[in-house]
Amino acid sequence: MTAADQPRDGAGGAGTGALLDRARGRALDLFHSAWSATPATVRRWALAAVIVNAGIAVTGAAVRLTGSGLGCPTWPRCTPDSFVPAAHDAHSPLNMAIEFGNRLLTFLVLAVAVGCVVAVMRVVPRRSSLVYLAWIQPLGVAVQALWGGVVVRTLLNPVTVSVHFLLSIGMIAAAFALYARSGEGDQPPRRLVHRDIRTLGFVLVAAVLTLLIAGVVVTGTGPHSGDEAASRFGFDIQSVARLHADAVWVVLGLTFALLFALHVTDSPGRARRGALILLGVELAQGVIGYVQYFLAVPALLVGLHVLGSTLVWIATLRVVYLMRSRGPAGAPFTGENLLDAAGV
């Protein structure tokens, strides 16, 4: 080693030490944000849960789109003899790495779920409504992990793959409920719009959920099964694609009707803006859907379409929550609140 090399080595060691210190500091900040929680940090953990649940739904689709669905052919091990990727004649190292990487993301989702539980248990005052919603997160991760094993053991049967995605949709809904409830009080819900408009919002949620179910049927019928050994639904792809397109137009019509009703009744600006954002996301998603269909469903556009599906679902839930109020955060539940909500 020359004298000229020594400063570089020292600088490199100092740089590595600084990175470790920074990472350690970030980890401690995360720990304290959950252990010494405030209403604001609870809301941030809930938002993180929405993001990671949406993210793993999209990365799960990426696993399928890259043909890596059985990159780890066993569960819970990656191969029959190893929990981590190992040489396997039937699967390439790249496919194994992609599938194993997606499995590792489950631990990130679990960490955020645990953070949500710790935060709502430690915040003062503790709110039982948030505790119940927070516990859905780690329990849901456990169910998703076990169901992932079913998906692998059934060789990517389209039914099990579809349920896997729909479970993620349910997890996103629970995480968003935690996010919305953490930013408001515990008073009985009070409508901010006309009752019929609120009902239209619920109908829209049901329509979007139906659209998502139709989408997974199309996905389970078309290409990109995830592996050559995977089976497919026996439906005619053009028929189910048309039904899916019809559901899209129903959702767009309901969204436009909701947006129009909110504007003509001079509803709160947040609800109107939320509906407008939802319509914009739906239009972008529709464009991607039609383009991918006419281009013979290239993998990249399919992945964007899955991302769009999660964004449409989140935007729909957001609009529904914006059309009612439970009072400001910290407002307690009282009998007078209940009488006010009932219009007495």
Image (spheres, rainbow, N blue to C red):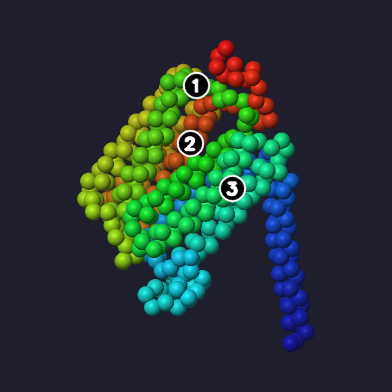
* Residue at the spot of label 3: 48
Judge whether 12 appears above or below 253 on screen. Answer: below
**Mark 3: amino acid:** Ala
10 Å crowding of disc 1: few (<14), some (14-19), many (20+): some
* Percent x, y of residue 49: 57, 47
Q: Please give the name of the residue rendered at 31% of the width and 38% of the height, measured from the top-left corner.
A: 247
Residue 264 position, x and y percent, is 44, 19
Where disc 2 sits, the SS reads helix
The answer to which of 175 and 281 lies nearer the viewer is 175
Numbered circle sitting on residue 317 = 2
Label 2 – label 3 distance at C-alpha: 16 Å
Quadrant of the snapshot with the N terminus: bottom right
The numbered mark at residue 156 is none
Which residue is painted at 45% across and 72% down in the image? 79
Q: Is residue 100 left or right of residue 64?
A: right
For mark 1, what is the residue? 193
Q: Nearer the viewer, residue 36 or 215?
A: 36
* Amino acid of disc 2: Leu
SS type, badge 3: helix
Residue at mark 1 to residue at mark 3: CA–CA distance: 29 Å
Q: Is residue 180 visible?
A: yes
